Image (spheres, coloured by chain):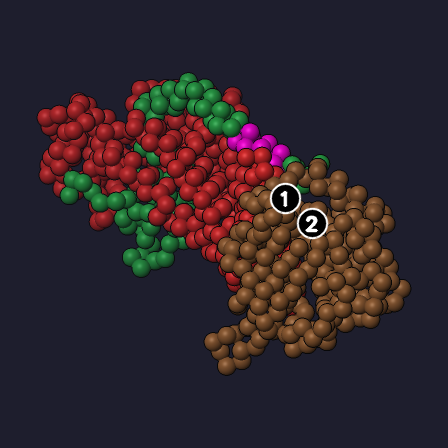
Chain colours: A red, B green, C brown
């Protein structure tokens, strides 16, 4: 036991010594490799955390949301539809939703204006999300001016800002009174943006949706399960965001392994010959190569992992911002709850350590099996 | 100090950090329950259906509400012109139909 | 003691360029003595050294080692012997590691690492604690007066210093038998006689030494107990103790 430990630590010593001999090459290798692990691990942390948030938050979304489609486009829905829908068996309640988009010419950025079912603010007052506050640099008590559809100015006073912990759903919200909403958008009477339908029994959601579609063929009922599925597909590995980054990373892993696997330099071969001649067995040489591979790949994994966690959960995945933000002006600050997906992270571990270490050992195999007296002959 | 000892130490420290991370994650999850309740309340009260991730266009802001044609609003053959549109897929099939 | 009986080594036996390096050699190497293999290049000296030093296996014939001690064989009383002709690779390597120390013509030191590490290298895979063999290595460096170069990369050392580091390396595992292949080939007369002095020191310590050389400074030395002449893989004559 002791002898085995000594053997490992001695050979590890020499492995480190060998790596340090080509210092700059190996350090740059380590840095790049760590970067790749960092990016992928960040992605895993980010996506898993978002996925969990989405699933939890949106489990509170309306059971069925009914939209009206005109010529293939989302159009306003008459509140009268709602009265008929509430007559369907299984429907607990129907609430018309009033919401819309507002583009801020002066500061740039899109806001979502929304009227809550129960009155939360008086006319002239609003509640805003953190993203809006940041974009316009306003705080509680300040006034902001919106431009109505009739090109009139509408001054509104901020009565509250939604907490940063809710940014993921509220960042761009402006919650206002029905009167102000009407002043802004001048909707025809008796119309709503869409209808939120509550179904008592979750298993009846599909049936109710089918009945609504039958009753009003110009509507499109959206189930809560479909909402969840939309976000699931957004965050899953086959989705656009993931494929691009993943493909880049896998390519990089391959390039690394390739560089190693395409064989040893003459110098490395000679060195192995010397080791064999002074009494190292083939297994000792392979152990040496094993440690060389492990030192680089394990370090890259551990450092990349730790940095990724800090990046995503302490710096709100700041490095992904350019990719995700696009042209958005309002962009939420992610205060995500840490989620550690052991399965995906262990896959990452094996992907990081196994191919690289194998690619370090295998080319050395041939050189390691050279007969020890070859060094005497050269 | 021997090189191998230094490496073992380095690795051990990192592994300890990871253990700490696991503890931190567990702790944060427990602590976030209150925040979660507030957020759930918000979603319920305001009847929200989407996360506020991409505020570029309406079909990226409300992907769950978007119809198939929103990205091509100008013309059926128009190209996608919002960066996050390439990240957001159109909603999957309608269960009612 | 090393006993060779009708040892032959043929390379590429089943090809058109088959070559017999060692042809039917019977020889006894006595312990504690300096034996020289003398002959021109191509006479089979190097191959013979490789066979004796457990680096290669003979094509035919037998090689027996007397009085050696390894983890799997002990011959304290000197009565029995170990036939290494058909030993598995693993045991052969163990014997080589513990019983033999090699000094190569080109020194074969690993570039880019320190002299001390080079000397310690053969001990790395043996399972011995580093503190132990490091101490031994430092003592050896002291013995051969190269202590001040312990931390220097071998690339910085002169020919003579390299030679001494190579000898120290051969001794790190306390072998009983030292094998040197043309050790003075790249050395001037002064360094060559210094080398022979060190050989004398080793002989005084009771080591068995086997040198292959065509350098008169070596084979005409007073220290030589037996000189075995070789040509074309055969022994042409033995001067001194058989």
SS at badge 2: loop
Asked if residue B96 is positioned above or below residue C197 in the image, the reply reads above
Left or right: where does residue A84 sit relative to residue C77? left
Asked if residue A277 is positioned above or below residue A57 in the image, the reply reads below
SS at badge 1: loop
* Depth order, front residue of C43/C126: C43
The C terminus of chain B lies in which quarter of the figure? Answer: top left
Q: Position of residue B9 (x, y in %)?
A: 62, 34
Q: Residues within 10 Å of mark 2 (few under 14, many from 20)?
A: some
Tell me the number on the disc at residue C77: 1
* Depth order, front residue of A228/A87: A228
Name which residue lies at 45% across and 28% down.
A337
Chain assignment, label 2 = C
Residue B10 magenta-drawn?
yes
Name which residue lies at 32% across and 53% down.
B72
Q: Residues within 10 Å of mark 1 (few under 14, many from 20)?
A: few
Residue A219 magenta-drawn?
no
Name which residue lies at 71% across and 54% down.
C31
Point out the residue furthest to the bottom here: C16
Q: Earlier in the sequence, mark 2 or mark 1?
A: 1
Name which residue lies at 68% across and 60% down.
C29
* Depth order, front residue of A271/C197: C197
Which contiguous range is marked in magenta?
B7-18
Tell me the number on the disc at residue A13: none
Looking at the image, can residue A313 be seen?
yes
Q: Are marks 2 and 1 on the same chain?
A: yes
Left or right: where does residue B88 sit relative to residue B68? right
The residue carrying mark 2 is C175
Looking at the image, can residue A281 be seen?
no
Q: Nearer the viewer, mark 2 or mark 1?
A: 1
Q: Main secondary structure of the magenta part?
A: helix
Spatial separation of the CA atoms under disc 2 and disc 1 = 19 Å
């Amino acid at each position: 036991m002791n002898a085995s430990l000594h053997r490992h630590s001695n050979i590890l010593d020499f492995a480190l010594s060998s790596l340090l001999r080509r210092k700059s090459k190996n350090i740059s290798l380590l840095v790049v490799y760590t970067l790749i692990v960092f990016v992928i691990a960040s992605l895993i942390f980010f996506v898993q955390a978002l996925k969990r948030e989405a699933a939890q938050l949106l489990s509170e979304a309306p059971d069925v949301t009914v939209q009206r489609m005109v010529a293939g486009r989302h159009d306003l829905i008459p509140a009268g539809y709602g009265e008929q829908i509430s007559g369907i068996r299984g429907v607990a309640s129907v609430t018309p939703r009033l919401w819309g988009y507002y583009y801020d010419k002066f500061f740039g950025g899109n806001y979502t204006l929304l009227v809550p079912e129960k009155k939360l603010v008086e006319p002239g007052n609003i509640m805003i999300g953190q993203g809006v506050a940041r974009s316009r640099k306003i705080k509680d008590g300040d006034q902001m001016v919106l431009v109505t559809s009739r090109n009139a100015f509408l001054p509104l006073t901020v009565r509250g800002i939604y907490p940063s912990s809710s940014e993921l759903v509220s960042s761009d919200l402006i919650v206002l009174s029905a009167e102000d909403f009407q002043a802004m958008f001048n909707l025809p009477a008796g119309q709503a943006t869409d209808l939120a339908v509550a179904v008592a029994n979750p298993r009846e959601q599909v049936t109710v949706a089918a009945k609504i579609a039958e009753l009003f063929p110009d509507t499109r009922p959206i189930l809560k399960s479909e909402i969840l599925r939309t976000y699931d597909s957004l965050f899953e590995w086959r989705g656009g965001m993931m494929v691009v980054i993943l493909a880049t990373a896998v390519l990089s892993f391959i390039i690394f392994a390739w560089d190693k696997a395409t064989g040893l330099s003459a110098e490395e071969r000679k060195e192995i010959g010397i080791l064999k001649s002074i009494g190292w067995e083939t297994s000792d040489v392979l152990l040496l190569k094993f440690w060389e591979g492990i030192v680089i790949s394990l370090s890259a994994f551990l450092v990349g992992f730790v940095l990724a966690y800090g990046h995503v959960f302490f710096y709100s995945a700041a490095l992904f911002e350019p990719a995700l933000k696009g042209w958005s002006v309002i962009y939420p600050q992610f205060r995500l709850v840490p989620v550690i997906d052991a399965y995906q992270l262990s896959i990452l571990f094996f992907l990081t350590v196994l191919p690289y270490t194998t690619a370090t050992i295998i080319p050395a195999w041939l050189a390691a099996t050279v007969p020890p007296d070859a060094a005497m002959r050269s | 100090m021997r090189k191998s000892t230094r490496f073992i130490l380095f690795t051990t420290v990192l592994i300890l950090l990871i253990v700490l991370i696991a503890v931190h994650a567990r702790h944060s999850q427990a602590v976030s329950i209150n925040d979660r309740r507030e957020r759930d309340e918000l979603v319920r009260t305001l009847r929200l259906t989407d996360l506020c991730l991409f505020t570029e266009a309406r079909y990226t802001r409300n992907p769950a509400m978007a119809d198939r044609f929103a990205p091509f609003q100008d013309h059926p053959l128009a190209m996608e012109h919002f960066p996050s549109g390439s990240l957001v897929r159109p909603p999957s099939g309608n269960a009612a139909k | 003691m090393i006993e060779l009986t009708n040892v032959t080594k043929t390379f590429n036996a089943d090809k058109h360029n088959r070559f017999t390096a060692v042809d039917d050699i019977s020889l006894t190497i006595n312990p504690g003595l300096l034996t020289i293999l003398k002959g021109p290049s191509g006479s089979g000296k190097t191959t013979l050294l490789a066979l004796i030093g457990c680096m290669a296996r003979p094509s035919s014939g037998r090689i027996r080692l007397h009085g050696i001690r390894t983890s799997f064989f002990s011959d304290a009383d000197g009565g029995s012997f170990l036939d290494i002709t058909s030993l598995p690779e693993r045991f052969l390597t163990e014997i080589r590691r513990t019983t033999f120390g090699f000094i190569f013509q080109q020194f074969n030191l690993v570039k880019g690492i320190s002299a001390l590490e080079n000397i310690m290298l053969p001990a790395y895979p043996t399972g011995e604690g580093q503190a132990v063999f490091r101490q031994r290595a430092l003592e050896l460096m002291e013995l051969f007066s190269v202590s001040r170069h312990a931390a220097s990369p071998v690339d910085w050392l002169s020919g003579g210093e390299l030679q001494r580091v190579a000898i120290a390396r051969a001794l790190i595992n306390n072998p009983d038998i030292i094998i040197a292949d043309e050790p003075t080939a790249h050395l001037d007369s002064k360094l060559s006689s210094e080398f022979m002095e060190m050989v004398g020191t080793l002989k005084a310590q009771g080591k068995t030494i086997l040198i292959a050389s065509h350098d008169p400074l070596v084979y005409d030395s007073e220290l030589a107990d037996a000189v075995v002449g070789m040509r074309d893989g055969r022994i042409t004559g033995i001067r001194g103790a058989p």
